[in-house]
Amino acid sequence: MTTPVLARCTCGGFRFKSAREPIVQLTCHCLQCRQVSKAPSTNFAFFKLAGSEVEGKTVVHSFTADSGTKTARETCATCGEMLMDRTEAFPKIIGVVADRIQLPYEFQARCHVWVESKCADVTIPEGVKAFARNMQ
Ligand SMILES: [Zn+2]
Ligand SMILES: [Zn+2]
């Protein structure tokens, strides 16, 4: 993978840069992502906050998970695209929506998470690890 990894939204208001490769890449089917992105599932690349730079104005959509943990999705304040996933449970990690990451980056899901709340008409590809809830 080529570093730094760069991401931006369509309007350019949001910019992200990481000096390092993502630590995990996954496809998320949770209700919070579905609600904010308006898409059936979201591809994420998770980076360590250390070595990552985030720029631009975002709107923070906060949720409290069943476990009591606070989690948030952030969208661009201008174009409304979903950009990031941050959760209290993993304060040193930031999830960036993979569709916003610029070439030559190529998304490769290590697993699918929150499959228990996936859209009924979404099929998980064969041979891919799937978790009912969070990754274990
Ligand atoms: Zn999600
Ligand atoms: Zn934007």
Image (cartoon, rainbow, N blue to C red):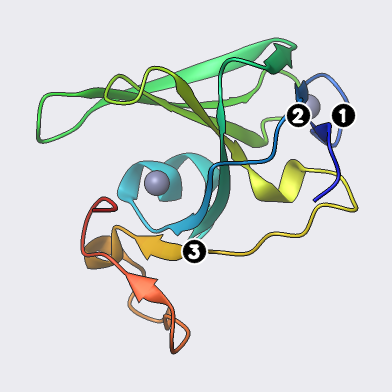
Tell which circle, 2 or 3, labels the residue nearer the N-terminal end: 2
- Neighbourhood count class around disc 1 (C-alpha, 10 Å): few under 14, some 14–19, many 20 upward: few
Above or below, 13 relative to 109: above
Q: Which residue is mark 1?
A: 11
Which corner quadrant of the image does residue 7 belong to?
Answer: top right
Tell which circle, 3 or 1, labels the residue nearer the N-terminal end: 1
Q: From the Cβ of disc 2, is ligand 2 less than 8 Å away?
A: yes
Q: Position of residue 23 (x, y in %)?
A: 54, 42
Q: Position of residue 73 (x, y in %)?
A: 47, 29
Q: Nearer the viewer, mark 3 or mark 1?
A: 3
Left or right: 83, with 105 as reference point: left
Q: Position of residue 123 (x, y in %)?
A: 42, 83
User: What amino acid is at disc 3?
Assistant: Arg
Q: Which residue is mark 3?
A: 110
- Neighbourhood count class around disc 2 (C-alpha, 10 Å): few under 14, some 14–19, many 20 upward: some
Residue shown at 11% from the left, 24% from the top: 68
Residue shown at 78% from the left, 24% from the top: 17
Q: CA distance from mark 3 to mark 1?
A: 29 Å
Which corner quadrant of the image does residue 20 belong to?
Answer: top right
Q: From the Cβ of disc 1, is ligand 2 less than 8 Å away?
A: yes
User: What amino acid is at disc 1?
Assistant: Cys
Residue shown at 18% from the left, 32% from the top: 65
Tell which circle, 1 or 2, labels the residue nearer the N-terminal end: 1
Classify mark 1: helix, strand or loop. Answer: loop
Q: Which residue is mark 2?
A: 79
Are circles 1 and 2 on residues that touch, CB within 8 Å?
yes
- Neighbourhood count class around disc 3 (C-alpha, 10 Å): few under 14, some 14–19, many 20 upward: few
Are circles 3 and 1 on residues that touch, CB within 8 Å?
no
Residue shown at 19% from the left, 24% from the top: 69
Q: Nearer the viewer, mark 2 or mark 3?
A: 3
